[in-house]
Image: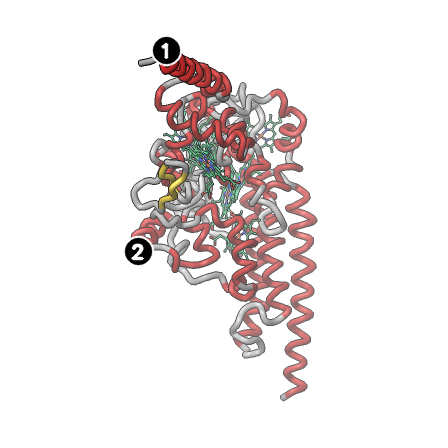
Amino acid sequence: MTFKNVFISIIIATTMILSAFLIHRARPEIELAQPSPEYIRATGKCASCHLKETSAIVHQYSMSKHASENITCYECHRALDGQEELGHKGFTLAKNVTALNCSQCHTTEYDQFIRSRHGAPAWAAVTGRSDFTEEQIAFAEKFHPKSVNRGENKLAVIEGPGVMEKGCLGCHAVGKPNSDGSIGSCTACHARHSASVALARQPETCGQCHMGPDHSQLEIYNESKHGVLYALQKSHLNLGADPKTLSTKDMSVPTCATCHMSGLEGMNITHDVTERLSWWLFSPISKKRPNYNLGQEAMKNICLKCHAKTHVEKFYREAEEVVIATNGKVQNALNIVSDLRKDGLLTPEPFDEPIEFIAFDLWHYAGRTAKHGAFMGGADFVQWHGNYELLLKTIEMEEMAEAIRSKSHQKN
Ligand code: HEC
Ligand code: HEC
Ligand code: HEC
Ligand code: HEC
Ligand code: HEC
Ligand code: HEC
Ligand code: HEC
Ligand code: HEC
C-alpha cells in the first residue's frame, strides 16, 4: 500500500466517524434519551426523516406515553396478518393503522370497546348489516339485539351516499368495520399520535359527535353545574392522572368520561360506554334496558364518590319521571301520524310528507333532549328545547292532520 492510499483511507475513515457523530447529534432528543437498539432502528429512522416531512406528528408522538415507554413508530405502523401492506423506505407498513394495531397491546380496552354501542352498532345505525360478517353480527346482537341485524337507515338513503359518508358516517365511523376484520377507531377519542388520556377526558372530545339538537349532550353538560365547574376549575384538575389510580382529588368535577368510563376511586375503568346506562333514551319511546339494575347501580356508584345517597336517589327519581312523562307525550303525537296512515291518508314511505318531518323532529329533537337534559342536569333542555317544543309541535301536527282529513273529505 502506498503512502498516498494510506492517507486517503485515514481521511475517509475520519470523515465517516465525524459524520456518524454529527448525524447522531442531529437526531431528535427523544431518541437520544432512549437509545435502545430497536428504538434507533425503528423510531430513529422514521422520526428523523419525518421531522422534516411531517414534523407535527413527531412532536405529538414525543409528548405521548408511547414515546416515554419506548413504543416505536414501527410497532404501531407495521402490517399485521390480514392487513394490506405498504412498502415504505425499506419498511413494510400497514396501509391503514386500525384498532387491530392498537389491540396488539391493549386487548382489554379493545374487547370492552367492541361490546359497546361505539362498536358495530354505531356503523350499522346508518348502513345496516351489509358491511359486517355473520360472526360480527352474531357477536354484536348478543349484547345489543337488533342493533346490527337491521336495514340501512331510510333517511340516510334518501339523502344519498355523499351526505352519508361526510355527514352520518363522520360520527358513526367510530364503529367502522376495517378491512383487516377488526372494528372501529380508537383514535376518535385518543388522537393518532398523542394517545393521551387527558385528551379523552375532556368533554370537547366526546362533543365532536355528542352535540346538536338530536343528542345535545355537550350543550347540556356545558350548562350543568358540572360543566360550569369544569370550565372554571379546569386548571386545578389533574386531567392526565393514571387511570388505574384516578381519584376525586385528581378530578373533583366529573366530565363525560368520569361518569361513563373512568375507574374513579378503584371502580372498574370501562371502554364499554353502555355499561352504566339503564334506559334507551335515544328511542322515540324509551324503555328500560335489559341490564337496567346493574347499569343504574354502576352509574350511581360513580355519583356516590362525590354525592350523598339521598341526593342521588332524588336526582334519578326526578329524571325517570321526565322520561315517563315524555314517553306519554311522544306516544300521543306519534298516534296522530299512525292514525292517518291507518286511514290511508299518508303514503307508507317515510319522509315524503311534511307531517312526518314534524313528528320526527318532535321525538328526535324535543323528546330526546328533554330526557337527556333530565339525566345530565340541563334544565333549559328539559324545558324550552324539550317540553315547550313537544307542546308546540303536537299542536302543529293536530292542525296538519285536520287539514289532511278535510282535504280528503272534499275529494270524496
Ligand atoms: C427517508 C425519509 C423517510 C423515512 C425513513 C420514513 N418516511 Fe414515512 N414518509 C416519508 C415521506 C416523504 C412521506 C410522504 C409525505 C407527504 O406525502 O407529504 C411519508 C409518508 C408516510 C406515511 C403516509 C403514507 C401514506 O401514503 O398514507 C406514513 C404512515 C409514514 N410515512 C410512516 C413512516 C414510518 C412508520 C416510518 C418508519 C418505519 C417512516 N415513515 C419512515 C419519508 C420517510
Ligand atoms: C400509537 C400508535 C402510533 C404510533 C406510535 C405512531 N403512529 Fe403514525 N399513525 C397512527 C395512526 C392510527 C395513524 C392514522 C392511520 C390511518 O388513518 O390509516 C397514523 C398516521 C401517520 C401518518 C400519516 C398522517 C397524515 O395525516 O397524513 C404519518 C406520516 C405517521 N403516522 C408517522 C408516524 C411517525 C413518524 C411515528 C413515530 C414518530 C408514528 N407515526 C408513530 C398510529 C401511530
Ligand atoms: C406495541 C405496543 C403498543 C401499541 C401497538 C399501542 N400501544 Fe398504547 N400503550 C402501550 C404502552 C406500553 C403504554 C403505557 C402503559 C401504561 O401506562 O400502563 C400505552 C399507553 C397508552 C395509553 C395511555 C396513555 C396515558 O396518557 O396514560 C393510551 C390512551 C394508548 N396507549 C392508546 C393506544 C392507541 C389508541 C393505540 C393504537 C393507535 C396504541 N395505544 C397502540 C403500548 C402500545
Ligand atoms: C354529529 C355526529 C352525528 C351525525 C352527523 C349523525 N349521528 Fe347518528 N348519532 C350520533 C350520536 C352521538 C348518537 C348517540 C345518541 C344517544 O345515544 O343519545 C347517534 C345516534 C343515532 C341513532 C340511534 C342509535 C341506534 O343505534 O339506533 C341512529 C339510528 C342514528 N344516529 C343514525 C344517524 C343517521 C342515519 C345519520 C345521518 C343521516 C346520523 N345518525 C348522523 C352522532 C351523529
Ligand atoms: C369514546 C372514547 C374512547 C374511545 C373510542 C377509546 N378510548 Fe381509550 N380511553 C378513553 C378515556 C376517556 C380513557 C381514560 C379513562 C379514565 O378517565 O381513566 C381511556 C383510557 C385508555 C387507556 C389507558 C387505560 C389504563 O388503564 O391506563 C388505553 C390503553 C386506551 N384507552 C386504549 C384504547 C384503545 C386501544 C381503544 C380502541 C379499541 C380506545 N382506547 C378507544 C376514551 C376512549
Ligand atoms: C367519533 C364520534 C364519537 C365520539 C368522539 C364519541 N362518541 Fe359516543 N357515540 C357515538 C355514536 C355514533 C353513538 C351511537 C351508537 C349507536 O347506538 O348507534 C354513541 C353512543 C354513546 C353512548 C350511548 C351508548 C348506548 O349504549 O346507548 C354513550 C354513553 C357515549 N357514546 C359516550 C361517549 C363518551 C363519554 C365519549 C367521549 C369520551 C364519546 N361517546 C365519544 C359517537 C361518538
Ligand atoms: C354526572 C355524570 C354525567 C356526566 C358528566 C355526563 N353524563 Fe351522560 N349520562 C349520565 C346519566 C346518569 C345518563 C342516563 C343513564 C341511564 O340511562 O340510566 C346519561 C346518558 C347519556 C347518554 C344517553 C344514552 C342513551 O340512552 O341515549 C349519552 C350518549 C351520554 N350520556 C353521553 C354523555 C356525554 C357525551 C357527556 C359529556 C358531554 C356526558 N354524557 C356527561 C351521566 C353523565
Ligand atoms: C367527581 C365528582 C362528581 C361526580 C362523579 C358527580 N358529581 Fe355532581 N357535583 C360535583 C360537584 C363538585 C358539584 C358542585 C357541588 C357543590 O357546589 O358543592 C356537583 C353538583 C351536582 C348537582 C347540582 C347540585 C346543586 O344543587 O347545585 C347535581 C344535581 C349533581 N351534581 C348530580 C350528580 C349525579 C346524579 C351524578 C352521577 C350521575 C353526579 N352528580 C356525579 C361532583 C360530582
- Residue 283 location (% of width, % of height): 51, 54
Looking at this view, is 22 or 183 the one in front? 22
Give the residue displayed 55% in from the left and 48% down from the top: 323
Give the residue displayed 62% in from the left and 29% down from the top: 230
Left or right side of 189 for 410: right
Report crowding for label 2: few under 14, some 14 to 19, many 20 or more residues within 10 A (C-alpha).
few
Q: Quadrant of residue 232?
A: top right
Residue to which mark 1 is pinned: 3
Instruction: Using the image, determine if residue 48 lies above or below residue 390.
Output: above
Quarter of the figure that contains the C terminus: bottom right
* In this rendering, the label closer to the viewer, 1 or 2: 1
Q: Amino acid at mark 1?
A: Phe
- Residue 317 location (% of width, % of height): 54, 40
Residue to which mark 2 is pinned: 134
Report crowding for label 1: few under 14, some 14 to 19, many 20 or more residues within 10 A (C-alpha).
few
Q: Is mark 2 within 8 Å of ligand 4?
A: no
Give the residue displayed 41% in from the left and 60% down from the top: 150
